[in-house]
Image (spheres, coloured by chain):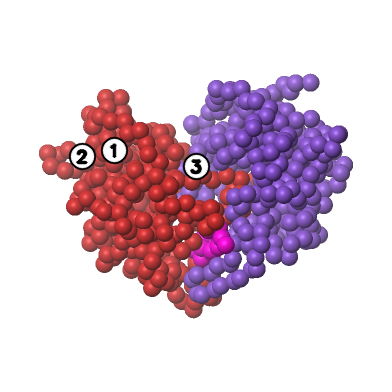
Chain colours: A red, B purple
Amino acid sequence: MPEIRLNPITGDWVIIATERAKRPEDFVHKKERKEMPSFVATCPFCPGNEDKTPSETHSIGGENGKWLVRSVPNKFSALSPVGEILKNKTKFKQNISGVGLHEVIIETPLHNMTTALLSLDHIEKILYMYRHRLIAFYEDERIEHVIIFKNHGASAGTSLEHPHSQIVGTPVFPGQVMNRLGEAIRNYYYVDFGECLYCSCLKTELEDKERIIEENDAFVAFIPYAALSPFHIWIFPKTHSASYGLITDREITLLATILKNILLRLYTGLDNPDFNYVVRTLSPRGADAKYFHWYIAIVPRVSQVAGFEMGTGMFINTALPEASAKFLQEIKLPV
Amino acid sequence: MPEIRLNPITGDWVIIATERAKRPEDFVHKKERKEMPSFVATCPFCPGNEDKTPSETHSIGGENGKWLVRSVPNKFSALSPVGEILKNKTKFKQNISGVGLHEVIIETPLHNMTTALLSLDHIEKILYMYRHRLIAFYEDERIEHVIIFKNHGASAGTSLEHPHSQIVGTPVFPGQVMNRLGEAIRNYYYVDFGECLYCSCLKTELEDKERIIEENDAFVAFIPYAALSPFHIWIFPKTHSASYGLITDREITLLATILKNILLRLYTGLDNPDFNYVVRTLSPRGADAKYFHWYIAIVPRVSQVAGFEMGTGMFINTALPEASAKFLQEIKLPV
């Protein structure tokens, strides 16, 4: 008998289709590994081609004054960085000028590298960069919401193979995020008399244990009880905080460890799958919010969204979350 | 300057990325057309193979007692058609047994046919079948919500190429649909003093004219003001009704005409693109609902969802809705 589970954070039901459940191994899509060079002369993100991107907004260097991680405005920005915000509202047509910030974070000088294989020290630098740009984006008064995300692989929507993340600041607060915030506030104030929904879910996951993949002093990585797809992973900070912008240096070290390990488990166990991850956070200005909790969601692209998901927002997960977690736990990481 | 438009029905903002806007022609992905046979011996949906599917639940015939459209339980159903509903709720883990109905509607005996090329008379039969199965599904007291959808082509999630639609009845009401219903009710009762949000949006679209593709006595097909992707199309009934289950025979004739024309415009103009469509409807039992309005949404799969869309629910549409509508209007349909 299949089971339908509620995700209390998104408010969505997920069908765990145990009848047609696959073994975790069935999601491994062996790919033809093409050997990639570490430098590509035409790649705008490779060192030496810095003039092919708009001027850098920040850079974190290694030795010899060379950059290891750099951020640049997106040349094909979805939003215009300059301009005034103009709002228009007639009854059923409401619009706002497409002003906003959109940057690319180039994660490494090496064209053929992948996050999972970078050193811990290097991943820390990427996470420092996320914090730096997030804070800078929110300093722009026109920005209402900022999202950090990474698309890895063609089926996850990447057009450039050089490792990079993106950060987008919009002049509107997204409806989906508003709905979740509403749910979190309702839970905090009415349902739980002042307990963060995310903290409570995390507590349940830690008690249950069986969906936890990794844990350290500051973070827990787990497959949520109502995971929307196989290997859908959440990384939650243990200490309540509404904004990634306030992450401490010590926490960054611990996040780098857990993020690397999780990506390495996916890389090893699922043969370098395409994936997306997003950092869900509020502004550091509103970081005293007691009801919201920042976190990272990782979604390997091993299944497809079709009419059912579009029309209902419900997902059909053909893997048991507990089995997916066990599979990832048991992967031997290279020492 | 890009523009951000609000979709009042979903509550989502859409970035109309005019800066990187493509011409409608750029979304045509010329495909290698492989010649398909009209009959495939191993296809469970081809005539003569009726014993390869579970027993038919309904069939609509042509002459000679042969079926033209038939519905059968999905052999790989996401939900179990038999069983009792068991509900479980601990604080942060809530689940319900995966009981529900899931059927396949085989649209034609011909393996190599496509909806756009079927006769009007035949499309009417498919629409009759939708109505019949929707009503039957809602007669099952365990069912809370029913969705009808079609996945056309591999990138839209089809695994079987023989033309078919699907209908799924779930024992839970989807969160996404609940959010939209909430928005519609709020609008109806508080914002507009008793005017259906959908009727009002349709009125605006009809006044604006420029995004209308087709219109007849009972239906309007248009690209919504805040279309989430290029060629995202809505077909709205002009007469207010909350349920497809109450569509009249005359309306079915008119819906067949407009649906065929729209699919034919996509087929001709975009070279048979992969697409999904969904029929969004409430139960015919609750069809006196003044605030909800059933409709069909068609989404050709010409763009990709990535981290930004996942993390915000906002879409980036690289085509101007008015330009997409004009492109589809101007396609010459075969007489």
Question: Against A233, is B161 above or below?
Answer: above
Residue A2, image x and y in percent? 56, 60
Position of A78 compared to B224: left or right? left
Residue occupying image coordinates x 35% and y 33%: A32
Residue type, numbered disc 1: Glu
Q: What element carries label 2?
A: strand
Q: Quadrant of residue B119?
A: top right
Discs 2 and 1 lie in a common subunit = yes
Q: Is residue B185 left or right of residue B59?
A: left
Q: Do we see residue B117 in this rendering?
A: yes
Residue under circle 1? A56
Question: What's the residue type where badge 2 is placed?
Answer: Trp
| Chain containing mark 1 | A
Residue visible at 67% across and 56% down?
B101
Which residue range is magenta in the image? A1-16
Where does the image place residue A234, in percent across and percent down from the top left?
A: 40, 58
* Disc 3: host chain: B
Chain letter belonging to callout 2: A
Foreground: disc 3 or disc 2 = 3
Q: Mark 2 points at which residue?
A: A67
Mark 3 residue type: Val
Give the residue drawn at x 72%, y 35%.
B47
Please state which of residues A231 and B206 is positioned toward the viewer in this rendering.
A231
Whole-angstrom CA distance, mark 1 to mark 3, is 27 Å
Q: What residue does disc 3 label?
A: B305
Q: In which quarter of the image is residue B179?
A: bottom right
